Amino acid sequence: MKRIAFALFPLLAAGLFSGNVLAGTRHDKETDENGIRNVIVMIPDGCCTELLALGRWLNGGLPLALDKHVRGLVRTYCSDSPIGDSAPTGSAYATGHRSQDGFVATYPAMSMDKEGRRFPTDSAEAYRPMFTLLEAARVQGKATGMVVTCHFPHATPADFLAHTPKRNQYARIAKQMIHHPCDLLLGGGAYWVDSSMKNGYCARKELERHGISYFKDFKATADAVEKGLTKAWGLFAPKEMDYEIDRDPEQQPSLEDMTRLALKALSRQENGFFLMVEGSKVDWGAHDNDLPAALFDFLAFDKAVAAAMEFARKDGHTLVMVMPDHQTGGLSIGNRRLDSGYATAGAAQLFDGLRNSKASYEKTVKDLFNDNEELSIARITGSLKRIVKENFGIEDMEEKDLARLARTLQENKSGRKSVRAFAEMMNRHSYMGWTTFGHNGGDVFLAAYHPMGEEPSGVVDNEQIAPYICRQAGLGNLDSLSLTYYAPLKQVFPDAGCRIVYGKNLFATEADDPRFIELELKDGKKLKIYPNTDHAELDKKKKTLPGICIYNGKGFYLPAACAGISGQDTTKRK
């Protein structure tokens, strides 16, 4: 197999951005017989390399689907910190640029080096939306899709399709993603579609306008795809989906199920596709040090990797890239209980209890308070004894530990503090260790499959992944596309008068988002643009913009082609 090492080169993009490209064989011929037509990016959010080893032990010591494809390591830091968050680290994979804490596919305003010597940023470009791999694939006429287990406006899926410097502005992000949709989206987040009816606005109708059918039942989605449907959003939970260990297969599909269905639908596009698959809740479990949650979600992710690799090998034109965005929790196989006995601890001693777990720590705590009733310390303690034995096979919990935990549970019920307190007690009775409830800054694994054996290898920066994919799949220059599709309003309409109108918004957007902007053009016509949509009105006649107008709290950005909207009709979308 040929291996490709990464090197750093500046990209020429009107002098405004710089980025990294891959040194090696160039594949930008689009769809010739040896070219890459399809790209699958797979992200186990917050996954550490320790989960590879732990997952293998719980897999009977057998290799994981990932194992033979591991090629190297990825450095995960962002522009303003050595420890990355999902928004900027996912943005690095999606755009080819490190960004800063909380930023979703948006150019950073801060570097960790105040003098800009090592990690320079261009202050003139701060807050500009950055074009993503998924958006570039759409411009190339490829089918696009995402499969996640979180709610769809969450950080990582948002990184590939939305643009804002505040990752928690879910309403703004959802609106951008609904008006700027990928062809297929499977996961959680039905709340942001179902609750959108307000002042005559309906997110479902917006999806239908783009030819996308909306489902909340996986079987119905699968049946429709089987009959030939290629554009669908299937949202199978109001917000995030359940952890794999807690999942009811009659109610929610697995990540593997959704990945296989996505591949079936997207592969019908002759020009190829781009698919992002995220094992979203590996990170969520690790944040709570909830080992059964994180581990079994990782194993579910590995099954999705197996499905993707199976497709790629048969297809012969598919590139698969697998890498976590960062690590979370600082997991270790071994803790202080093994300080003097680690060499004699057997696999059964270390792993059997975990292997026999029947629920996440989160669900265990929630089940104690399923009717939200007030419980006494004695009753909570008794319930803890029973449920710990039933779910985890542990019978030797000390009374003082149970009593201390019971007091925390009584005060906080099923809140996060209770889940973490329960996890702390459980982890003291295991042989696994954790260092934090937050993220940690270690390198993560890089796995890849290229049909011609031209996978990257070595230690790679996270911002090098996107340029490599662009070159292999012929997706163009993301920096140039950013300049074309996300130009500042004043650059597109330099001589227009502008009035920003606030008030009651159509859709539950952020409170400070304008309702619309009204431009008085040089020819006297008035152009009204609705931010975070592709809707406009020219002298009260409805228009569709050749892209989306982004309002991110810092400015308005829209396609440069909008400049011709009052003359030659440039409003036909690709």
Image (spheres, rainbow, N blue to C red):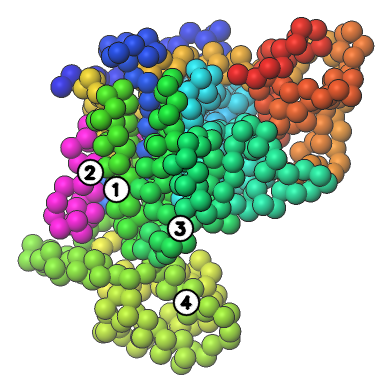
Q: Give the crowd class for mark 2: few <14, some 14-19, many >=20 residues within 10 Å.
A: many
* Secondary structure category for the residue under label 1: helix
Whether label 2 touches label 3, CB < 8 Å:
no
Label 4 to label 3: alpha-carbon separation:
19 Å
Res 425 quadrant in image: bottom left
User: Where are the magenta residues, as a range?
Assistant: 52-78
Query: Type of residue at label 1?
Result: Lys
Residue 65: mark: 2
| Residue 66 falls within the magenta-colored stretch | yes
Work out whether residue 40 or residue 397 is closer to the camera in this orientation and state it. Answer: 40
Q: Position of residue 434 (x, y in %)?
A: 32, 59
Of the numbered discs 1 and 3, the one sitting upstream in the chain is 3
Q: Give me the C-alpha separation between circle 2 and circle 1.
A: 7 Å
Q: Is residue 421 left or right of residue 168?
A: left
- Which quarter of the rendering shows the N terminus? top left
Name the residue type under label 3. Gln
Asked whether 44 or 109 is in front, the reply is 44
Which residue is disc 1 drawn over? Answer: 303
Q: Is residue 76 above or below residue 403?
A: above
Q: Position of residue 550 (x, y in %)?
A: 68, 29
- Mark 1 neighbour class, 10 Å CA radius: few under 14, some 14 to 19, many 20 or more: many
